[in-house]
Amino acid sequence: MELEKYQRNHILSKSTFVQAKQCTKLLYLNKNKRKEKKDYSKQTKVLFSFGKQFEADFRNKFDNGIHLTEILGNKFHYYAAYTEELLASKGDETLFEAGIIYDDVLVLTDVLQQNENGSYTIYEIKFANKLKPVFIWDLAVQYYVCKNKLQNIESFNVVLKGKKGKFRILNVTDLLEKQLEKISKEVVEFKKVLNLDNAPEVKIGSQCFRPYECPFMDYCRK
């Protein structure tokens, strides 16, 4: 497959947007001081593995889904154009880690289901029992990108852990619709941060530990 024709550039991603929501200095350092980044703890890595299995179990509910990560790996610049081609050529289709770019922001959707009438149903999978504030940040930027690019979204859903191993699916479309204007302004702000000559001046505080412990804590303490 000739990947060059699929290249699309982006400035922010879902994960870097969430970093910026936690701390704009974290966003800047993640781009410019990656060698200073501390690795995840063993406990965090174990949680990641549980989350990946939870995602896989939910995706198994869909027949013949195409997993873009298995095709493209970490070549993130190719996801959006390749996704567009699949949606245009396949008709009703289910994609895992479908790439969507809007306003220089790339998001990869856990499950993107193209319906027969041309609308889309989206599922974001979270290995948790409840909808946490940080999840809203994550879901909101995804909805912002998908709503503006795909337009015809039937529902945007989050998948949580239910009782007795079942999945709990919440339709959060209306909740995320209210976030659009705010997300638009934050995208502009965060792109400006990445263009700064130096890291923003942010003192060590509660944002260093919530919602996640910052991997640049040792660097900032110097």
Image: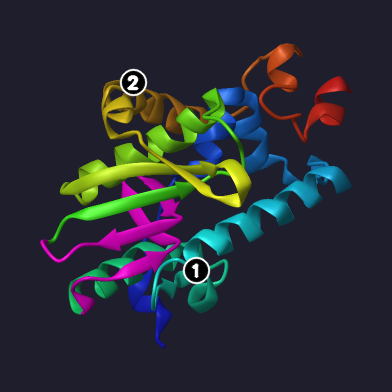
Q: Is residue 32 visible?
A: yes
Place of residue 74 in the rendered image (x, y in percent of width and height, measured from the top left)? 57, 66
Residue drawn at point x = 44 percent, y = 54 percent: 108
Quarter where residue 180 is shown: top left
Q: CA distance from mark 2 to mark 1?
A: 35 Å
Please tell me whether residue 178 is drawn above or below residue 81 in the rendered image. Answer: above
- The answer to if 71 sits in the magenta stretch is no
Query: Which of these two is toward me, 118 or 8?
Result: 118
Check disc 2 and report its element: helix, strand or loop: helix
Place of residue 144 in the rendered image (x, y in percent of width and height, measured from the top left)? 31, 37
**Residue assigned mark 1:** 60
- The amino acid type found where label 1 is placed reads Asn
Residue at the far left in the pictured view: 117
Place of residue 113 in the rendered image (x, y in percent of width and height, measured from the top left)? 30, 61
Check disc 1 and report its element: helix, strand or loop: loop
The residue segment tinted magenta is 90-117
Q: Nearer the viewer, mark 2 or mark 1?
A: 1
Residue drawn at point x = 50 percent, y = 68 percent: 60
How crowded pointer 1 is (Cα within 10 Å; few <14, some 14-19, many 20+) is rated as: few
Tag 1 or tag 2, which sits nearer the N-term? 1
Q: What label does residue 35 carry, if any?
A: none
Q: How many marks?
A: 2
Task: Report the colour scheme.
Answer: rainbow
- The amino acid type found where label 2 is placed reads Lys
Indicate left or right for 46 with 169 as reference: right
Q: Is residue 194 visible?
A: no
- The answer to if 97 sits in the magenta stretch is yes
**Residue assigned mark 2:** 182
